[in-house]
Image (tube, rainbow, N blue to C red):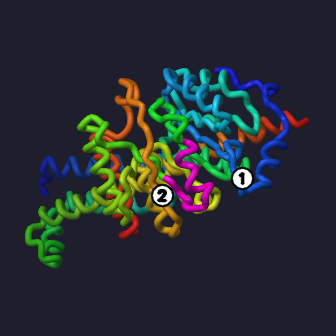
Amino acid sequence: MILHIYQILGILIGIIAILLSLWRFKDGKMSLGMLLAWILIWAAIIVISVYPESTSLLATITGIGRGLDFILILGLIGSYYLIFKMYNTIENMEHEITLLVRELALQRDETKSKIDKK
Amino acid sequence: MKSTPINDFKAGSDDISASNKNHSKLSSHDIYVIMPAYNESKTIKKVIGKLKEKNFNIIVIDDGSHDETYQIAKESIYNSPNESIYRHVLNRGLGAALRTGIEAAVARNAEIIVTFDADGQHDPEDIIKVSRPIMEGKADFVIGTRDFNEMPLSKKFGNEIMNVITRIFYGIHVDDSQSGLRAFNRKAAGFLDINLRGYGVSSEIIGEIKKHHLKIAEVPIQTIYTDYSMSKGTGLGVGLRILFKLIINTIKRVFL
């Protein structure tokens, strides 16, 4: 079996990404659930790189037709989902920062008056 | 930046609690003016001075200004139950600043809370004007309406759009949804659940008032236009940003 360049790239990127994920997990920067999810995603990319024909089967099942189209559509939907998730996470963090900043402003005043009364 | 000295805090809140006993006769002592300020070092001293002349209680919220706003305001504000300054360590937007101010005013047993812009565009005389419907029990929330015809075209357009947006998203029409001069009573303050941080908050507040079936009044006010105050506030850019925020929020409410 002769591998094309895109296949080799796919395999390499997949392996590097899995290694990075494991590394981050070891450092405690990633949860176990996220690690498993990412390993699954990247493993799927490696499998598809090695057996590109496998996507044709999925494409036929879903009715999209061509294997490559299936992968592209899946990738796009996945990316949009991630962007949406990130937007929400950032929005939540902004909200929490605001809460902290407001609380800090109000509490500083309280502390001042307490010290003053002593 | 040095932290604020502790000994300039004037003790005793007797005068406030005393004046609160008499609810029917509300005076300027019961009115708390909350003034959010972000990079207003050029105007804030003058504005605070004018408010002090009229004996209003003042709460300044410095929303993480990058200029000398906090230091300058600190010089004119004598920390006491009647005057105080709060500082956000980071800039969190108008909505956040108003919320801090409202909480502080409620903690000080304010009967009437008036929001007032720090850029010098409002006339302190109008504070009494917008508070009157509340004193007379005719309203829970009063908007000081600016005359749109006095505005330059881009501002007029931006404000008109915001009125339409407020109507679409919150189902209520007011003549000036983005006015920085508003008054509300304790009851209304308790209902306000402000989530937006930026300028969109003006519309959100009106939406909250409507949601809780509080009485709204609109009173015409003066606007003092200077080159400085002209460069701030709701232009077209801000309007579009608010629109984007409101759409996203609605999507989130519906789908999440």
Indicate whether B40 appears above or below B249.
Answer: above
Residue nearest the observer in this picture, A115 or B52:
B52
Numbered disc 2: secondary structure: strand
User: Measured from the top left, where is residue B136 in percent x and y?
Assistant: 61, 58
Query: Which label belongs to residue B217?
Result: 2
Residue type (three-letter) at the residue carrying disc 2: Ala
User: Measured from the top left, where is residue A105 in percent x and y?
Assistant: 65, 39
Residue nearest the observer in this picture, B18 or A116:
B18
Residue nearest the observer in this picture, A79 or B67:
B67
B36 sits left or right of A86 in the view: right
Q: Quadrant of residue B21?
A: bottom right
- Which chain is indicated by disc 2? B
Residues rendered magenta in the picture:
B127-142
Disc 2 residue crowd, few under 14, some 14–19, many 20+, Cα 10 Å: some
Indicate whether A39 appears above or below B39.
Answer: below
User: Measured from the top left, where is residue A110 in percent x and y?
Assistant: 76, 41
